Amino acid sequence: MYNKQGRRGDLAMNVMALVVTTGVFVGLSVWFLIAERYLANYGKCTIKLNEGDKLFELNGGGTLLSALYENKIFIPSAFGGKGSCRYCKVTVVEGGGPLLPTETPYLTRAERMSGVRLACQVKVKQDMEIKIPEELLYVQEFQARVSGVKELTRDIKEVTFELIEPNEISHRPGQYVQVRAPGPDGIVTRAYSISSPVYEKNIVQLVVRLVPGGIGSTYIHNLKEGDPVSFTGPYGEFRLNEDPEVENVCVGGGAGMAPIRCIIYSIFHRWLERSCWLFFGCRTTKDIFYMENYEELSKKHTNFK
Ligand code: FES
C-alpha cells in the first residue's frame, strides 16, 4: 500500500517535472523566435555575389532567398520557400553560419562539404559571400497579360501570356518559368515549361494540367483573357545538341509535351532538314493534342516523324 502510494507520488512528480521543463523549453523557444523576429538587429549587411560580379547592401535579418529576390536575383524556389523543394541551392563561401537541421535532409554529403545551402533557410546576419550559376544572373521578372486560353484535353489547358515588361524573352528550348500564384498563405511560385518556340519572343505559352487541389494549376486554369500575370525566368539547364547531324528523339505525354513542343518547333525553325522523332504517350485518344500541328509540320519537314 505504502509502496503503491509512494510510486504514484514519484510518477506525479516526474510528470510535473516533465510538464515544467517542456513549458520552460517551449516558452524560451517562443521568446527566441519573437526576439529574432522583432528585436534582433543585424544592421546593414553586404552580400558579395560571384567573386564581386555584384555587390549589394541590405538590412540583415531576412532569408538569403528574399534578400536576393529584393535585389532582382531570382533563385528557383517553390512551395513558398518552405525548405522542401530543394530548388534554392546556392554556394555560401562565407558568412552563412552553421548548417541548419532544416537543410541537412535536402543536401548531399558532397553539397554540404562544398558549402551548398538552401537560400530559403539561411538568414542574412552578417556580411556574406555567395556563388550562384552564372545564368541565374540573367533571369528576369516579367509582367504579362493573358492573351489566350485553349482547352487541349479534359484537364489540360494551353495558356498564352503576352509579355508587357520586359516585352521580350530570350530562352533556350526546354527551359521553364516560375509563375507567381496566390495561395492561402500568400504568394507561391510554381514552375512550368515554356511550350512556345524560342523565336516567338513576345509571348510565353504554357501547357498546364489541372492537379486537383494544386495551387498553381488551379490558378492558371481559372485565368481569363486580359488577366495580369507575373513570373520569373527563364530557368533550367537543358541544352539542345547544337550538332545538326545529331538525331533528336522526343518522348513525352500529357503536360510533359510542353517543352517538347518548344524543342520541336525551335529545331525546325533553325535546321530545316534535321532528323527528329516524336513519341507521344497517352492512355486514350482523347488525351492526344497538337496532332494536326505535328502532322502539318511533318509534311513540311520530311525528317520529322
Ligand atoms: S525554396 Fe524550396 S527548398 Fe528553398
Image (spheres, rainbow, N blue to C red):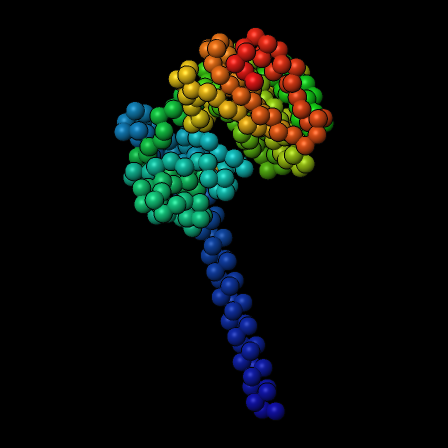
Regarding residue 84, the answer to whether it shows in the image is yes
Image position of 2 (left or right of 95):
right
Image position of 52 (left or right of 42):
left
Q: What residue lies at 36% left-to-right and 47% top-to-bottom?
A: 109
How far across and down, in percent of the image, does residue 148 sit? 65, 15
Regarding residue 168, the answer to whether it shows in the image is no
How far across and down, in percent of the image, does residue 23 sit? 52, 62
In this orientation, which residue lies closer to the viewer: 114 or 143? 114
Residue 6 vertical placement versus 260 (above, below): below
Q: Quadrant of residue 193?
A: top right
Residue farthest along the left direction in this orientation: 51
How far across and down, in percent of the image, does residue 111 sit? 36, 42
In this orientation, which residue lies closer to the viewer: 13 or 265? 265
Q: What residue lies at 68% left-to-right and 18% top-to-bottom?
A: 150
Q: In what quadrant of the picture does the C terminus appear?
A: top right
Q: What residue lies at 50% left-to-right and 12% top-to-bottom?
A: 268
In this orientation, which residue lies closer to the viewer: 197 or 132? 197
In this orientation, which residue lies closer to the viewer: 275 or 109? 275
Q: How many marks?
A: 0
Q: What residue lies at 70% left-to-right and 30% top-to-bottom?
A: 284
Residue 163 vertical placement versus 221 (above, below): above
Image position of 138 (left or right of 191):
left
How far across and down, in percent of the image, does residue 203 sit? 55, 14
Q: In what quadrant of the picture does the N terminus appear?
A: bottom right
Residue farthest along the bottom direction in this orientation: 1
